[in-house]
Image (cartoon, rainbow, N blue to C red):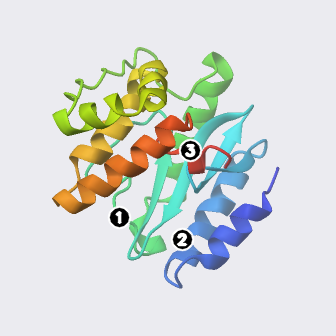
Amino acid sequence: MGRDPRVDDYIARAADFARPILEHLRELAHRTLPDAEEAIKWGMPHFLVKGKNVAGMAAFKAHCTFAIHGDGRQGEAMGQFGRIAAVSDLPDDGELSARLLAARGRVLARGTALKAGAVREPKPPIPMPDDFAVALADAPAAQAAFDRFSPSHRREYLEWITEARTPATRGKRMAQAIEWIGEGKKRNWKYEKC
């Protein structure tokens, strides 16, 4: 059972309401998955078996989430259990353990927690905004790097830019994007080392 001190730090920094939830989920995961290792992925604690994600948890300002990989997303919150504000909001430990064991079994059998036959539909492309196309054209290094990015990495930048609520924010995001892209950085490059 591998414990990561970064998970200790994550839990210690969480809000008072969240610590008991995170500690409960952590202990349950290790009881159920004695071969699990901990890691921080996407800035959140995860439990891995043979290097593959089985489950992850996160704390926010007013709730926590718990996601068992391969179980699909349900509702508006990240994970399958909604917005968890207290340990009592969780299903009973037996149900959680059964679902963790099922995800572990998928990892051991197929190398992924995704359920058999699960198909991820590609997201529709986001049209290139004219103003961003002009900004890229004015920065040849950024244009060349952007063209080399995978569709998902291009999409992350385009979503970030088109979701800006004000023209000022959009302008700042485009300028930042041009800088990062010119350096060959993907949109979420800061989290890639976790």
> Which numbered mark, 3 or 2, is in the foreground of this view?
3
Quadrant hosting residue 63: bottom left
Q: Residue at x 38, y 30 (%)?
A: 154
The CA distance from mark 1 to mark 2 is 12 Å
| Mark 3 crowd level (few <14, some 14–19, many ≥20, 10 Å Cα) | few
Residue holding disc 1 = 83
Q: Nearer the viewer, residue 39 or 104?
A: 39
Q: Write down the quadrant of residue 19 in the picture.
A: bottom right
Q: Position of residue 87 (x, y in %)?
A: 48, 72
Dot 1 surroundings within 10 Å: few (below 14), some, or many (20 or more)? many
Residue 20 position within the rendered picture, expressed as x and y whole percent measured from the top left: 58, 76
3 or 2: tag closer to the N-terminus: 2
Whether residue 41 is situated above or below residue 131 in the rendered picture: below
Distance from disc 1 to disc 3, alpha carbons, whole Å, reads 28 Å
What residue is drawn where x is 58% and y is 24%?
A: 112
Label 3 belongs to which residue?
189
